Image: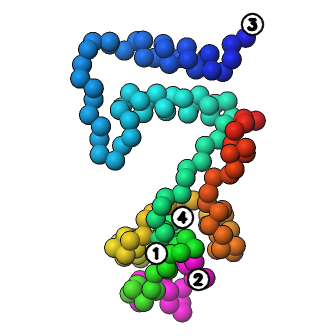
Amino acid sequence: MSKTGFEELLESLIAYFGSRSQAPSPPPRRQEGRIGTPAEREAAKLIVGFLRSRGYEFYRRPPEEDRFYSRQGRNLFIYVREKGTLIDLNLFPDELGLFGSESAWRITNRMAIVSDAEASSLDRAEVILLEHGFKRWDHPEEMLVNYFALGDFSVFEEPPIGAQAYGP
C-alpha cells in the first residue's frame, strides 16, 4: 500500500527533528519582525518545500502599503495602489536623466516606467523613492507592464483559493 503525501511529510519531519538533541533548554528568543521560532520557521520551510515538490504553488499577499517601486535591470517601475498617490516627478533631479526629453519613460495615474536608464541614476532614484515612503516590491516585468496597461492592482494578488488548493 502506498503512503500518502502527508504520511511522507510526517515521516520526514519526525526523522529531521528526531535527529536533533532533545536536551531541555529555554525556548529560543524570537527576532524582531520574525514570526515563529527558528525551529518553527525551519519546519515551515520543509513543509513548503515538500508541497512545492508535489506541484503546489504559493503566492505572497501584497503588502498593506500603497506605494511601491521595482527595479528590473535598467528599468524602473514606480507604482501605487488605487488609493495611493504617485510621486511628484519634479523630485528627481534633471541630471539623473530619468524623466527628461532625452529619456524613455511613460506614465499613467498609477504607474511610471523608466526604460534603459543608467545604473547610477537608478541607484539615486531608489534613495529618493525610499525617502518618500515607497517600498521595493519586485515582480516579473510582464506583470508590471500588465498593471501599467490595465491599472488593476489585482494582477499582483494571489489567485482565488480554488486555484491554489490543488496540485497539478
Is disc 3 in contact with disc 4, using a CB cutoff of under 8 Å?
no
Report the side of 143 relative to 86 (left or right): right
Which span of residues is magenta-colored? 94-116
Residue drawn at (62%, 57%) of the image: 157
In depth, the one of 102 and 24 nearer the eye is: 24
Q: Where is residue 54 in the image (x, y as percent from the top left)?
A: 67, 30
Q: Looking at the image, is mark 4 or mark 1 earlier in the sequence?
A: 4
- Disc 1 secondary structure class: loop
Q: Which is closer to the viewer, label 3 or label 1? A: 3
Residue drawn at (43%, 65%) of the image: 135
Q: Where is residue 158 in the image (x, y as percent from the top left)?
A: 63, 52
The answer to which quarter of the image holds residue 35 is top left
The amino acid on which the numbered mark 3 sits, given as a three-letter code, is Met
Report the side of 52 relative to 86 (left or right): right
The answer to which quarter of the image holds residue 49 is top right
Q: Looking at the image, is mark 3 or mark 4 earlier in the sequence?
A: 3
The amino acid on which the numbered mark 4 sits, given as a three-letter code, is Gln
**Circle 2 Cα neighbour tier, 10 Å, few/some/many (<14 / 14–19 / ≥20):** few
Residue drawn at (62%, 34%) of the image: 52
| Disc 3 target residue | 1
Farthest residue, direction bottom: 101
Q: Which part of the image, by quadrant, shows the C terminus?
A: top right
